[in-house]
Amino acid sequence: MLMVDKFLDYIKFERNYSPLTVINYRKDLIEFERFYKELDPLLSWESVDSDVVRNWMEYMMDRGNSASSVNRRLSALRSFYRFALRRKLIEKDPVHGLQGPKKQKPLPQFLKESEMDRLLDPKMWTDSYKDVLARTIIVTFYETGVRLSELIGLDDKDIDNITCEIKVTGKRNKQRIIPFGKELAELFAQYQQVRNTTVKGDSVAFFQTEKGKRMTGEQVR
């Protein structure tokens, strides 16, 4: 443990790591040492190779540890071996070039049909500009499938309530025409009427804030 103690003193006194980080690093290194000793009692910090580190990662994943947890422990081991290599305490770094497990992306959350029906129900909303705007945005997303960037980029000229078509500008300025139904056309007309009597300004944007500015992505969210 002499090598580990030198490393812990280094991150504590020279790098000024927090006491909690030092404790966690010590715990991670002790766990790794326990693991490789169980594999082979003759192994040491100097003789461990990359296969042993890979086995350790697989062992942790098999025990249900998340990718984030495994990567955190691997980071502690990587920092330790970099220190040891710089101080010439070892001849080679077994962690060099190893990649930790990729983090799994969370599955998207979907609304149930009954929940969506309640969300679109006009009775759920007031006649205020804020509510009319919010409901129009939700129905537009739901019926047309436009992206957020496409929605906030819509201008009045892009909405045709006669032909029931929206002209959207997507990535690399590519334009496409999206048809929509009579219900959305009526909602667009209602929204524009409320907007034009409530909002002051000369913005050409279709979806506007109460101050007459084009909505940002954050405001839509």
Image (cartoon, rainbow, N blue to C red):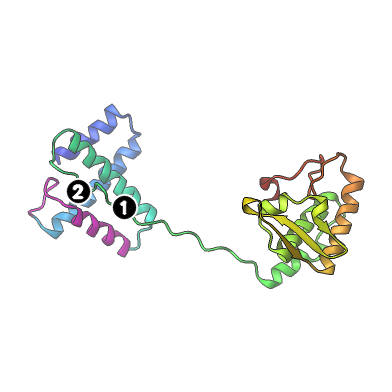
Residue beneath disc 2: 94
As drawn, is 105 to the left or to the right of 191?
Answer: left
Q: Which residue occupies 74% across, 62% down?
A: 177
**Residue 50 part of the magenta-drawn span:** yes
Residue toward you, 168 or 206: 168
Q: Which residue occupies 22% across, 48% down?
A: 30
Q: Quadrant of residue 211?
A: top right
Residue beneath disc 1: 99
Secondary-structure class at tag 1: loop
Which is more N-terminal, label 2 or label 1?
2
Q: Which residue occupies 28% across, 33% down?
A: 11
Residue furthest left in the image: 42
Alpha-carbon span between mark 1 and mark 2 = 12 Å
For badge 1, the amino acid type reads: Gln
Q: Quadrant of residue 85?
A: top left
For badge 2, the amino acid type reads: Pro
Number of callouts: 2
As drawn, is 63 to the left or to the right of 129?
Answer: left
Q: Which residue occupies 28% across, 27% down?
A: 14
Residue furthest top in the image: 14
**Position of residue 68 measured from the top left corner of the image (x, y, whole percent):** 39, 53
Label 1 crowd bin: few (<14), some (14–19), many (20+), radius 10 Å: few
As drawn, is 123 to the left or to the right of 93?
Answer: right
* Quadrant for the N terminus in the image: top left
Residue furthest bottom in the image: 113
**Position of residue 22 measured from the top left corner of the image (x, y, whole percent):** 30, 38
Secondary-structure class at tag 2: loop
Residue toward you, 188 or 123: 188
Q: Provide the residue span drawn in magenta.
A: 42-62
**Position of residue 148 measured from the top left corner of the image (x, y, whole percent):** 67, 53
Q: Are marks 1 and 2 in contact (CB under 8 Å)?
A: no
Residue toward you, 50 or 60: 50
